[in-house]
Amino acid sequence: MKVLVTGGAGYIGSITAEVLLAEGHEVIVFDNLSQGHRAAVPDDAVWVQGDLSEPSAIRRAMMAHRPEAVMHFAAKSLVGDSIVRPFAYLRDNVVEGLNLIEACVDSGVQRFILSSTANLFGAPGNAVIDEKAPIAPGSPYGESKWTLERALDWVSQTHDMRYAILRYFNAAGASAQRGEHHVPETHLIPLVLQVAAGQRDCMTVFGDDYDTPDGTCIRDYIHVLDLAAAHLLALGAIETDNCTYHLGNGGGFSVRQVIETARTVTGRRIPEAIGQRRPGDPPRLVANSDKIRRELGWQPQFGELEQIVSSAWQWHQAFPKGYEG
Ligand code: UFG
């Protein structure tokens, strides 16, 4: 299939593009490089530098390349940043997503896969979160994704379009060639590995007074290649119907456990200090992904935290400066 991948120069988008190509699909990457890296885009993908805030740029790309499906990864995606800069999320993520959905409708693209988030459930306590959990977006970022989920649902009722909404928990890890490189980096695992590599002095733990066993926040880390595999399955599933799935491993790890695992994997010293809580961080987010396992046969291949951290470490060692090397 011919798939247009927005955000295909970013972390999850570029790795999904890599997997799509390996499976014989054609890929058009559409990215404005505001956060992504040109070097992350697979050589075999068609490259279009363009901005989703400009409807004419998207339409041109659609007309020129005639995709049969769109995977929409491009977005601002930092929970904490969205608390500080709500309009960058509530306006830009929503308007850009709507521009893309409308361009799909206008050019007859009938399949749409949306990268959504676990940041839709407030502070859900100790439950694992399934697709029936009540929605209460935890930040302007979560709200922007929820708005796009709703928009897609309406558009699928009014037009010939089917969608898959994939709600990621915490994407992590790397393929052999591509990994996580944000500027500035704010994510736990790449930061911990930068400390292990001696590129930073110390890891700051954002709060150790949460109501969790060791006082630090718990997240469900999922390997980016397992996320990519779910996108390929979803592409098949939307031939017949809309779907919404949660993607995680169903196991939660605390910030302290992640740092400890990184010490084991790297064999390096990783000094840590306790800092303030980061606004917007829920204490615990763990997925129930039974639905996609049951309905699409999704089976994570890299379910252990050690495998995830070790793949990120291998990539870090191969590309110590990420895409700027
Ligand atoms: N953390 C630290 N110190 C750091 C960085 C992070 O203690 O220097 C902690 C955070 O407080 C949080 C955990 O590590 O408890 C994970 O933080 P990340 O920044 O790596 O990831 P988030 O959970 O904030 O967010 C990620 C994605 C979002 C997505 C969310 C879903 O960035 O887009 O997972 O759970 F919505």
Image (spheres, rainbow, N blue to C red):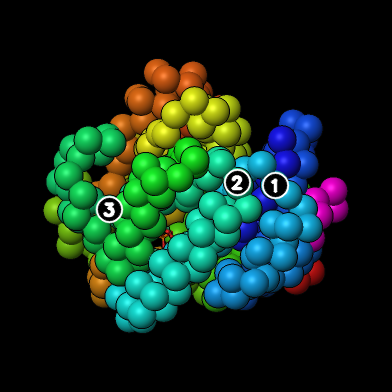
SS state under label 3: loop
Asked whether residue 215 is in view, the answer is no
Q: x, y percentage for residue 190? A: 55, 60
In the rendered view, does 304 fall on the left or right side of 57? left
Q: Is residue 298 left or right of residue 47?
A: left
Q: What is the magenta range? A: 43-47
Instruction: Indicate which disc, 3 or 1, sits on the residue closer to the N terminus.
Output: 1
- The mark nearer the N terminus, 1 or 2, is 1
Q: Is residue 109 above or below residue 281?
A: above
Q: Which residue is mark 2?
A: 109
216 and 278: which is toward the camera? 278
Count of all numbered marks drawn on residues in the image: 3
Instruction: Tell me the residue at 48%/22% (across/down).
Output: 296
Cβ atoms at labels 2 and 3 below 8 Å apart = no
Q: Is residue 216 above or below residue 2?
A: below
Residue type indicated by callout 3:
Leu
Amino acid type, callout 1: Pro
- Marks 1 and 2: CB-CB under 8 Å? yes
Report whether the residue tagged 3 is closer than 8 Å to ligand 1: no
Quadrant occupied by the C terminus? bottom right
Please say if 213 is above or below 207: above
Residue position for label 1? 67
